[in-house]
Image: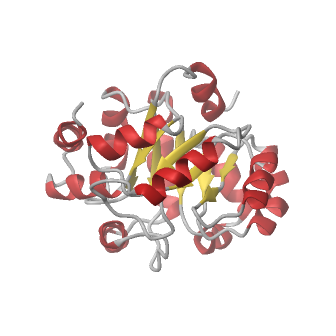
Amino acid sequence: MNKINKLFADNKDRKLLSLYFCAGHPTLECTGNVIKTLQRRGIDMIEVGVPFSDPMADGPVIQQAATQSLRNGTSLRKIFEQLKAIKDEVRIPLILMGYLNVILQYGVENFCKSCVECGVSGAIIPDLPFKDYLELKPIADKYDLRFIMLITPETSEERIRFIDEHTDGFIYMVSSASTTGAQKSFDEAKQEYFQRINAMNLRNPRMIGFGISNKQTLESSQQNAAGAIIGSKFVQLLAETNGDAELAIDKLYDALGK
């Protein structure tokens, strides 16, 4: 069974926590250590960011991390090498998060094949049109790889149900239609959005991401989905600690009241 599916199947009564970080940031060789540290410290799933020069869905913190990572010499090929080196030590699901152009340049089938060889269970491609996803899905299915789709407050109910019907793993529920970045709280409009999606009784579990940085936003997310995804806050802490993942996760847990 794909590790993503197994994670949700085995934890129906427990709220999950997933973290995002950008591979190759703040140092080129930190990727493997960050993953192993987060696994040891109880993180359930990790999104490994593939740096891109024009990350349209990302706020300033992750944009800056991607820029630094590219300057450090990070490439998709390099990331696969780093992941392959730690494959036998990683038990939790790893998801690559990157933009379509990078994956097309690498080759979709080569990408899926490399993911499997390196222990990656899924991919999130924010700028992948759903029509194109349907065309790529048979290739992903061939390698038992999950392409995770995003929904936002602006996504229609018809489109959400179509996504739910044609995807597997989980649905990435973006808390707002803006770019990534920490928020102090989720306003009434976001709460209504969470409740509206809850009432749809979707087949796939959902994870809420974008803007989670403290106890309030974490608890709100976990009350309205299978779990939460934290990105910008952890990326910022990694930068502040010069890549010390142990210290960064300590600081994150403090901010979350854990």
Residue occupying image coordinates x 36% and y 49%: 31
- Please state which of residues 209 and 67 is positioned toward the viewer in this rendering: 209
Residue occupying image coordinates x 58% and y 22%: 12
As drawn, is 193 to the left or to the right of 78?
Answer: right
- Please state which of residues 221 and 76 is positioned toward the viewer in this rendering: 221
Residue occupying image coordinates x 16% and y 55%: 242
Tally of numbered tags: 0
Can residue 160 be seen by looking at this rendering?
Answer: yes
Q: Position of residue 156 (x, y in %)?
A: 71, 63
Vertical arrangement, residue 139 with respect to residue 216, above or below: below
Q: Which colour assignment does the render follow?
A: secondary structure
As drawn, is 122 to the left or to the right of 76?
Answer: right
Q: Position of residue 53 (x, y in %)?
A: 44, 79
Find residue 68 and report its image quarter.
Answer: bottom left
Vertical arrangement, residue 13 with respect to residue 171, above or below: above
Question: For the C terminus, which image quadrant?
Answer: top left
- Please state which of residues 3 and 176 is positioned toward the viewer in this rendering: 176
Find residue 108 and report its image quarter.
Answer: bottom right
Q: Position of residue 129 (x, y in %)?
A: 72, 70
Question: For the N terminus, which image quadrant?
Answer: top right
Vertical arrangement, residue 209 with respect to residue 33, above or below: below
Can residue 49 be seen by looking at this rendering?
Answer: no
Q: Position of residue 98 (x, y in %)?
A: 54, 63
As drawn, is 115 to the left or to the right of 33?
Answer: right
Residue at the farthest bottom position = 54
- Please state which of residues 17 and 142 is positioned toward the viewer in this rendering: 17
